[in-house]
Amino acid sequence: MSAERGFIDLGDHDHQSLSSGRPAPDRVTGRRKMGVRLVAAFVVGMVLGGVAVNQLRDSREERERNSSISLVAFVASGGSGGGDARGIYQMAGQLTVINAGPAPITVRATSGQLPGIRVRGAGQSPLLRPGGTAWIEVEVRIDCSIPFGSEPLSTRFTVEAADGRVREVSHPVAVIGSAWHREVEQPCAHLADLVKRDG
């Protein structure tokens, strides 16, 4: 009898759940768990997506920083030199180079040309941190028959950036009133006299 009652009770319970329109407790729990899992998966996806976007943006910004090159250059000093019968004066000089960009650079080569003036680098710079300064040895060749003009010397620098790529950048270097100009004034005047006398 009790077995029958238990059977009837179970049947009544199922019947009541179905007739009342409410789902069984196991189904409700399963749905809740599924909902929690979906929300958790959504949150994890959002977090991972945000991290990936941030990493991508940081990587792009770092690449841009590493590839961005900006420098400033000016005449630092002029050394003793000598001239020849053609009125060409050659001397050792120095350029000051400042890394005005956001990433470290190394200046590998230097050259510049202007009517009457030719410059060639005699070495490379050490690694220049942002804001760092270096002095580059150069060979300066000046044709004393061509007067100094106000036009700056267009100077090209072969630069290795932090990303390992080598690029060329240009910067104008003022020569009038510089140490190079002062150094060659008297020798060039003397050479000009010799050329006139011999000519």
Image (cartoon, rainbow, N blue to C red):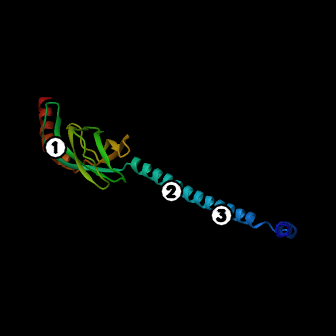
Which quadrant of the structure image shows residue 108?
top left
Q: Which mark is residue 83?
A: none
Q: Earlier in the sequence, mark 2 or mark 1?
A: 2
Question: Could you tell me the amino acid type at mark 1?
Answer: Val
Residue identifier under label 1: 184
Q: In 3D space, how far apart are the residues under numbered discs 2 and 1 (Cα atoms)?
A: 57 Å
Q: Residue tagged by mark 3? A: 36
Camera-side mark, 2 or 1: 2
Mark number displayed over residue 54: 2
Crowding at dot 1, Cα within 10 Å, few <14 / some 14-19 / many 20+, comes out as: many
Q: Position of residue 178 (x, y in %)?
A: 21, 50
Element under disc 2 = helix
Image: 52 above or below 143: below
**Badge 2 amino acid:** Asn
Residue 144: % across, % down: 19, 38
Mark 1 secondary-structure assignment: helix
The local crowd at label 2, few if under 14, some if 14 to 19, many if 20 or more residues have their Cα within 10 Å, is: few
